[in-house]
Image (spheres, coloured by chain):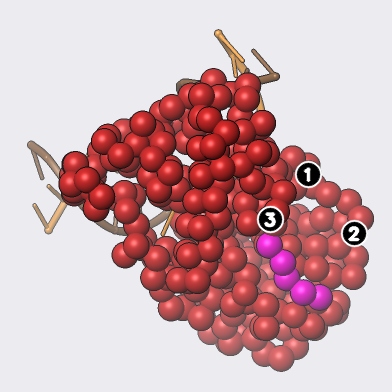
Chain colours: A red, B brown, C orange
Amino acid sequence: MPELPEVETTTRGLAPHVTGQTVTTVNIYQPQLRWPIPKELTQLEGQTSGDITRRAKYMLWNFPQGSVVMHLGMSGTMRVVDAETPLKKHDHFEVVFANGKALRLNDPRRFGAVLWQEKNTELSIIQSLGPEPLSNHFDGNYLHQKLAKRKGAIKNAIMTNAVVVGVGNIYASESLFLSGIHPKRAANRVSKERCQLLANNIKLVLKKAIQQGGTTLKDFTQADGSPGYFAQQLNVYGREGESCAQCQSIIKNMTLGQRSSFYCPKCQR
DNA sequence: ACTGGATCCTGATCGC
DNA sequence: TGCGATCAGGATCCAG
């Protein structure tokens, strides 16, 4: 489900509700997510939370002794509700606050994660992350240099977290379309100029999507339950068989790295 | 060192 | 209407 814009949208929506709250209870209903939810999270009971930030597609919820690291996987959503609200199917994790509200993670496919990171340490999954796409460190020069030895498809490369984080299947297809680059092109055969273009378009697409509150494909909702509105602006994703807005060619869908990849065979080379 | 593939899981949808 | 097959927005790990 969520790519970077969706995680950003969720983080922003949650922030006012989960910052500076006293935790009364931590409930782990289904610990079996991508990794088991650590029982030590119950140590947060009685603690007061700090702010919540985003790194890649992870949310970092800070406490005095460390951070709760949360990932939504493919199907996760986080909501703040009244603590008396009945649990829904697939509500796996809950933090109840002294003010009568509760933060809940719902994740049908259970590809998401809830982990604990001690203060002044970094989990290996966080440590290995590449630069944020919206940071100054990510630009055409960086991308070109990073791709120099990669012979595989450019689409797979920009979806690799060690290269750049936060570019998922939707926005990978979209940014390649905007850049006129064929998804299957060898990464090391994208010129420096086109890397510049691609880096800029990745930033553009992600920024736009964040402004729109994310892309609601199936059931993504923002923290307040409203949908994202970016879907209507997609040029190629999910538009197989439709005509390209730029050249009227028929948009195609092929499988790359076991993920569907949409592209315009004429505009993208 | 890279990369392709399998894998964790449920649910929606499609074809018969 | 029912049922099995297929496909989903992620990302790690392992074999080759």
Residue lying farthest to the bottom in this orientation: A99
Residue A243 in percent (x, y) is at 18, 48
Would you call the spot at circle 3 few (<14 residues within 10 Å), some (14-19), or many (20 or more)?
Answer: few
* C-alpha gap between disc 1 and disc 2: 14 Å
Q: Is residue A187 left or right of residue A26?
A: left
Report which residue position mark 2 lands on: A119
Q: State yes or no: discs 1 and 2 in contact (Cβ < 8 Å).
A: no
Q: Is residue A64 left or right of residue A222?
A: right
Would you call the spot at circle 1 few (<14 residues within 10 Å), some (14-19), or many (20 or more)?
Answer: few
Residue name at image x 36 percent, y 31 percent? A269
Q: Main secondary structure of the magenta part?
A: strand
| Protein chain holding label 3 | A
- Residue type beneath disc 1: Gln
Is A52 inside the magenta-drawn segment? yes
Looking at this view, is B9 or A233 the one in front?
A233
Report which residue position mark 1 lands on: A127
- The label nearer to you, 1 versus 2, is 1
Q: Read off the magenta span.
A: A50-54
